[in-house]
């Protein structure tokens, strides 16, 4: 009798531990995925499932004493009717709605590459020695290291319209007005 009581306790502890572990893992992963999708303004297509819903589904799928036999369960799942395939226009509309991109033309234009890395390298090679020296002196003496690093990072992957505006703000912030005017003259010359 003690053996059955001990065995029952072990099984009960195992079930409780497995349930808590599964519920915790589900919750943590669900929160993590939602947090990862926030910057993209994306929403999971499935509604958020509560703990009681999760445990209910876990019990339904793992309960061997279901009234259906395994053969019946396999055929009922496999014989489900296929939904009608949407047209290309419907798929595009759904994609736009799912990713919340409607009305974002200005944002897309801002993210479009205006000057590629290769174009920047070509323009840099066209600069005269004096102009290169003037630009380097102005930027290295006036801009702090983190601002120079930020500009350098932007230049590595090509410049978008937003990057150009940000660089312009950074440069205006640290250069004197006459230095900024001189820098813009040099940039616009090439």
Image (cartoon, rainbow, N blue to C red):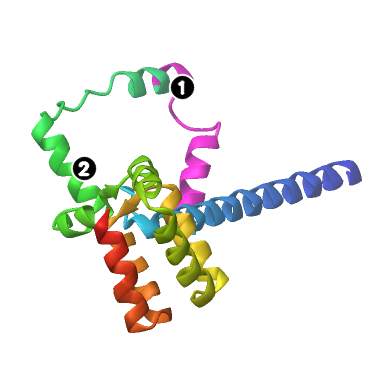
Tell me if mark 1 has few (under 14), some (14-19) or many (20+) residues whose alpha carbon lies within 10 angstroms of its own.
few
Q: Nearer the viewer, residue 130 or 185?
A: 130
Residue 120 is at least partly visible in this image: yes
Which element carries disc 2, helix, strand or loop? Answer: helix
Compared to residue 162, the image places residue 159 above or below, namely: above
Disc 2 and disc 1 in contact, CB within 8 angstroms: no
Residue under pointer 2 = 95
- Residue 171 placement, left or right of 133: left
Residue 48 is at least partly visible in this image: no
Label ID, residue 42: none
Q: Main secondary structure of the magenta part?
A: helix
- Residue 181 placement, left or right of 18: left
Quarter of the figure with the N terminus: top right
Label ID, residue 69: 1
Which quadrant of the structure image shows residue 48?
bottom left
Residue 126, percent from left and from top? 35, 47
Residue at the location (44% across, 54% down)?
129
Q: Which residues are magenta?
A: 53-72
Q: Nearer the viewer, residue 19 or 1?
A: 19
Q: CA distance from mark 2 to mark 1?
A: 39 Å
- Residue 173 placement, left or right of 26: left
Q: Sequence-wise, which precedes: disc 2 or disc 1? A: 1
Tell me if mark 2 has few (under 14), some (14-19) or many (20+) residues whose alpha carbon lies within 10 angstroms of its own.
few
Residue at the location (80% across, 46% down)?
10
Residue 180, percent from left and from top? 34, 75
Which of labels 2 and 1 is toward the front? 2
Residue at the location (36% across, 17% down)?
75
Compared to residue 31, the image places residue 10 above or below, namely: above
Q: Is residue 189 magenta?
A: no
């Amino acid at each position: 009798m003690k053996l059955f009581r001990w065995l029952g306790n072990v099984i009960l502890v195992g079930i409780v531990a497995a349930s808590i572990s599964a519920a915790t893992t589900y919750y943590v992963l669900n929160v993590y995925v939602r947090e990862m999708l926030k910057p993209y303004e994306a929403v999971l297509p499935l509604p958020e499932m509560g703990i009681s819903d999760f445990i209910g589904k876990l019990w339904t799928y793992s309960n061997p004493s279901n009234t259906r036999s395994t053969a019946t369960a396999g055929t009922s799942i496999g014989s489900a009717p296929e939904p009608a395939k949407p047209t290309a226009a419907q798929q595009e509309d759904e994609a736009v709605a799912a990713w919340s991109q409607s009305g974002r033309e200005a944002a897309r234009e801002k993210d479009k590459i205006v000057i590629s890395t290769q174009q920047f390298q070509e323009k840099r090679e066209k600069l005269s020695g004096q102009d290169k020296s003037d630009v380097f002196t102005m930027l290295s003496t006036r801009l702090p290291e983190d601002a120079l690093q930020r500009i350098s990072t932007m230049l590595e992957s090509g410049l978008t319209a937003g990057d150009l505006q940000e660089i312009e703000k950074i440069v205006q912030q640290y250069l004197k007005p006459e230095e900024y005017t001189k820098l813009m003259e040099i940039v616009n010359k090439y």
